Structures are given as structure tokens and as C-alpha cells.
Amino acid sequence: MQNSPKTLMPVKGIPGRSASVNGEDYLFFSGFAYLGMPSLPAFQQLIAEGAKSHGAVFPSSRISNTPSVLYEDFESALSTLTGLPASASFSAGYMASQAAAFFASQNSELLYAPGAHPSLRIAGQQIPPLMETDWRQQIIAIVNHHERQNHTIVLESVNPLSGEVHDLSWLKEIRRPVRLLIDDSHGIGLLGDRGEGIMAYLPPPGHFQYLISYSLSKAFSCEGGALSGGQKDIDGIKKLPWFTAATGMSPLFAGAWIQARPLFARQKERLRAAVDYFHRKAAGIPALRHDPRLPVAAVGDPGVYAHCLKHHILLSAFRYPSPQDPLMARIVLNALHTTGDIDRLCACLRQYFKA
């Protein structure tokens, strides 16, 4: 993704409800700090305490004879959140997804969803140029009729560009054992009553074997990533170089994440209220597409971006998948936004479409 000079708005400091650009304040409806953690004093305090108690880097390999107890506690807490038996943490969500995809490719055929995130792709694997509905029917047929072949279906839980939770109801048509590798980076911490992510919408395990990959930076604002899944899969992944030969996630973030769980729950409720209010307030605005489960709304008319900018409201905007593609505009809410902020945003949107 690249921004053109016309949309580049360098932010100074920590964006929250607002952001400082070239010395001027803008209402900030961009980024991905959905729970609004970075500017919360209580969270900043936990980060500082984590640095003092655990340090920025744990000076030992994850497979050395002197492992950190903190990582075990952290990964156990991730398993409790997702409801899956085991977890492994990494220094980045991208690395977690790469490790999962490589592991799955060693004992199964990878069946990629159209538009699967680059972090899930490994060399030599092809992404199907199909429509979503055609792909689903093809996958159902492949899994159900190839009994001697192991398969892993690879997909994302959320499309962060369109702001939609992917419909996974078609999984009920699958009748054979299959692994699902799902990138839940934009669902974990947001979806489900506890923030368990896409697991809240998936069928019981049964013949499904789940391997969930996620970044911890999107909702939780902690630098790192993780995998949660069955014990056998996670044990196998922990033998790969992505885990054994890499520096572990910064312990200050692992420690802060454990301590911040009550804060995450509180901010999730605040975000839920803001999203509900926005969904009601924005009803009927043209060219707006919003899944009420998510804090992201896609704006079909790119001219909205420039109009909002004139009124000191900064939306998310970029050209994707290439710099030559049309500008995409999105509205990204976070838990710090007030009803007044949302009123101002919606009034600006209605003014644009009325004009």
C-alpha cells in the first residue's frame, strides 16, 4: 500500500480521538488502534511497568535451557481468550502467519481464499482468481470428494478494507476433516462477547481443526503476534525456525497485555457503544457500507476524503492494491471517540452528499 503526496498526512505524537498534522488538530478516524489503548494513561503505565519488570528484550532463545516463565503465562492467557488448547507468540503477526502457513503446507494442500493476506502466502502457492461464491463451492467440492488428501483452507476473518466480517456459514457444508488457517488480526479483541475474535462465529471443532493467526497490534496495541490452535499443531510450529531461531516478542508487551485485560474489556464496551451510535447516526448516508460488528466503514465515493479534510476530519485513505488504483476511503472508529465526534463526522458526510 502506498499513499500519494496528496493524501499523505504525517502525524506527530500519538493519535487518539484527534491527531496533530502540521501543527493543526484533526478528528482522527484512521489507523487501527481500535480500543484506543496507546493514549490511555493506565495502559502507558502498564507498558512502563512491563519494561521495568521484564525488560524490552528477553536475552535468551525460546528453546534455551533458561526460558521465560512470562511467555508461558502469556500464551496460556491467549489460549484462554481464544478458547483453543495452545498458543505460540511471535515478534510480529506477519511472522506468526508465515510460520503457520509453512507448517500447514508440510502435511496438507493449502486452499487459499481470493485476496488472502500476503502474510499467509508462501512461495509457489497460487491465489485463486475467483469470485468469493465460486471459490466457496469449489472448496466444498475439493474437500468433500478428495478423501485421501489432507487440506488446509487459508483465509481471513475480516476484510479490513471493506469493513466486513466474512460469511463462514458455508462451512456447514463440509463433511470431512479439514484444517482452517484463519488470519484474525482485525477480529481478535473486537468480535465475540469476550473479544475472542472469529472463534465466536465458527462451528464447534468436530471435523474442523482450527489454527488462528493474529497480530496483537490492531486492537491491543501490543507489538507482536500469535497463533492459537490444537496442541499438536502448536507443538509442531514451536519446532520451526520461525519460533526457535527468532527473538521472542518483547516481554514488556507480553507483561502489559496480561495486566491490561480489564482495560481491554472496558475499552471494548466503549467501542461497542461508539460503533452502535455511529451505525444509527450514519443510517441512510449514500455510498457508506458498514458491518455493525466492526469499527470500520467503507466509503464508496473517494471525494468524501478531501471534503472531510477541509473540515479537519482525517479519514483513512490509500490506493490499493497498487499506487495506480483509485483512492479508497474508510472511516475507522476507536473507543476514544465521543458521540460529539461522531455527530460532527456524520454531519460532514451528509453535507457532502447533499451538495
Image: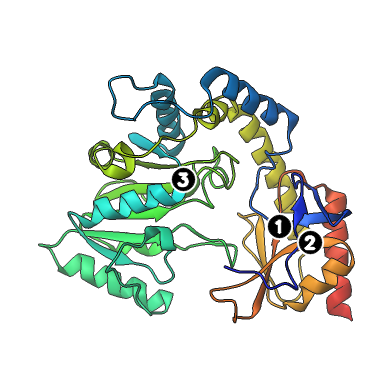
Do residues under tags 2 and 3 come within 8 Å of each other at their CB atoms? no
On residue 30, the disc is 1
| Label located before the other in sequence (3 or 1) | 1
Residue at the left extreme of this rendering: 148
Quarter of the picture containing the N terminus is: bottom right
Q: Which residue is mark 2?
A: 314
**Residue type beneath disc 1:** Ser
Q: Which residue is mark 3?
A: 92
Nearest to the observer: residue 61 or residue 335? 61
| Label located before the other in sequence (2 or 1) | 1
Residue 294: name its quadrant.
bottom right
Nearest to the observer: residue 58 or residue 105? 58
Nearest to the observer: residue 312 or residue 286? 312
Residue 50: name its quadrant.
top right
Q: Is residue 218 above or below residue 42?
A: below
In 3D space, how far apart are the residues under numbered discs 3 and 1 (Cα atoms)? 21 Å
Q: Is residue 54 left or right of residue 311?
A: left
Assign a secondary structure to mark 2.
strand
Identify the residue at horizontal 71%, vertical 48% (top origin).
Answer: 334
Q: Is residue 176 left or right of residue 300?
A: left
Identify the residue at horizontal 28%, vertical 38% (top origin).
Answer: 238
**Residue type beneath disc 2:** Leu
The x and y percentages for residue 199 are: 43, 46
Do residues under tags 2 and 1 come within 8 Å of each other at their CB atoms? yes
The x and y percentages for residue 56 are: 53, 29
On residue 82, the disc is none
**Label 2 Cα crowd, 10 Å radius (few <14 / some 14-19 / many 20+):** many
Assign a secondary structure to mark 3.
loop
In 3D space, how far apart are the residues under numbered discs 2 and 3 (Cα atoms)? 27 Å
**Label 1 Cα crowd, 10 Å radius (few <14 / some 14-19 / many 20+):** many
Q: Is residue 60 above or below residue 138?
A: above
